Amino acid sequence: MSSVASAPVRVRFCPSPTGNPHVGLVRTALFNWAFAKHHQGTLVFRIEDTDAARDSEESYDQLLDSMRWLGFDWDEGPEIGGPHAPYRQSQRMDLYKDVAAKLLDAGHAYRCYCSQAELDERREAARAAGKPSGYDGHCRDLSAEQVEAYQAEGREPIVRFRMPDETITFTDLVRGELTFTPENVPDYGIVRANGAPLYTLVNPVDDALMEITHVLRGEDLLSSTPRQIALYKALIELGIAKDTPQFGHLPYVMGEGNKKLSKRDPESSLNLYRERGFLPEGLLNYLSLLGWSLSADKDIFTIDEMVAAFDIADVQPNPARFDLKKCEAINADHIRLLDVKDFTERCAPWLRAPFAPWAPEDFDESKWHAIAPHAQTRLKVLSEITDNVDFLFLAEPAFDEASWTKAMKEGSDALLTTARAKLESADWTSAESLKEAVLAAGEAHGLKLGKAQAPVRVAVTGRTVGLPLFESLEVLGKETTLARIDAALAKLAA
Ligand code: GLU
Ligand code: ZN
């Protein structure tokens, strides 16, 4: 059921390039992208870089790179152009100045000469009197003499949009009908005193010029929507906009302690997920669940399944909780779903410098291919591969202290001696045979398999946890395995 979109859909993703992309931004991009795909619509990628102090070229590059890594595509955008180019707001300043001039001419906007100190003082007074504390309309209808007097004082005006004195009601695609009364939506600045147009102007003007039909964005922007709807009305009157878009506000994402996940929380940084080796598939699957779900009994799905099912009307307005553990678990499931060749290729970055501790010439391609299917069943994130296979490529993997203490108990030397003897005569083309050897060694010492295999694992890999042991031994080979058991025995004897 998609009552929301009868005409061709045009949505936009319009981040500001101010630092590392965060997961909230990715969720917004995902929902817009899925919505566009679902309706065979157009996704516009626009860069809101009007804040010269905070925007940077580096962040811009990082943003594009991140979006591509996630697998998003767009139909119009800064690097591909389109009928409404340019798509970077820093290159569209003349357009905004022109619109601001038209709004002033038509009386939809006016010059406000109030100083910050005056605004603060009147706000305080209104607050004290229990009145609405937004802008009080002081400069709405200044006389020519007042304007002249202000100018003589050298005051530099900002441009303010004149809100109509009427209640604004709209139907949010997520939240249903919402109503804003005039005292809660005061006149607001659209151009700074230095002539720089503000977000409050450029964002809806671009949505108008780019013929955006649906604005899907975070709940934090909900308070700007009644202002934008009023501005739209003026733009339509001036022939600048065709229609007011529909709005849908996506729920807040909450982090630890039920606080809004903030850009400063480390788990909000997209880069962290890339560096840890999340799959874009896994991350997007998880992020799609922040406010939406495919069905009650299906948490794991592909992006195509999401696109097919995505309906903005199904998005829940209540805050969504970000749960890193669940995100990892979903990612692990997506690792299992890869075909093994794909898995092998995606691990490649973690098998070389700077992650890999072994020398490049010690990396053995055939061992890697033999162990990869077993690694694929264990990893939560790809970066874990390095520690899990280092025993294959390091001549002498170091013993992890804690693992050694935990696994090497009294009698471990006797167990290891027996295991070594049994392994020596085992069939090294069969992991099953290696398992039987260790099982038999355990029996000889009254130990179950789990207890018997722990010292063997630490002797051979250096750690208590790792990939399936007998497959690991098979890949490592008889000679090296026995030599490592000897080294562990020597250490125990010392
Ligand atoms: N550039 C705005 C932001 O990053 C987007 C606002 C919007 O989606 O309308 O918050
Ligand atoms: Zn004023």
Image (tube, rainbow, N blue to C red):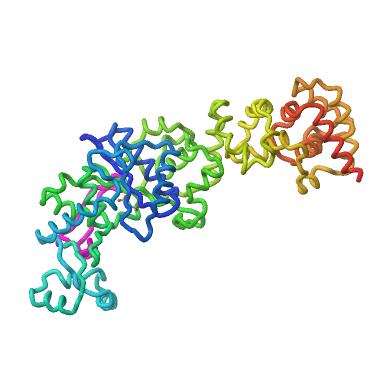
- In the picture, residue 303 is in which quadrant? top left
Foreground of the two, 91 or 409: 91
Foreground of the two, 246 or 237: 237
Magenta run includes residue 170: yes
Going by the image, does 413 lie left or right of 172? right
Q: Where in the figure is residue 420, as x and y percent of width and height?
A: 86, 30
- In the picture, residue 212 is in which quadrant? top left
* Residue at image location 32% in from the left, 51% down from the top: 48
- In the picture, residue 188 is in which quadrant? bottom left
Q: Which residues are magenta?
A: 163-191
* Residue at image location 14% in from the left, 54% down from the top: 234
Going by the image, does 295 lie left or right of 354? left
Foreground of the two, 281 or 196: 196
Q: Is residue 189 visible?
A: no
Q: Residue furthest left?
A: 144
Going by the image, does 272 lie left or right of 54? right
Q: Where in the figure is residue 177, as x and y percent of width and height?
A: 25, 49
* Residue at image location 24% in from the left, 47% down from the top: 207
Foreground of the two, 396 or 164: 396
Q: Where in the figure is residue 292, as x and y percent of width and height?
A: 40, 41
Magenta run includes residue 333: no
Residue 300 against residue 237 in the figure, above or below: above
Q: Quadrant of the N terminus?
A: top left
Q: Is residue 21 visible?
A: yes
Q: Where in the figure is residue 85, as x and y percent of width and height?
A: 25, 43
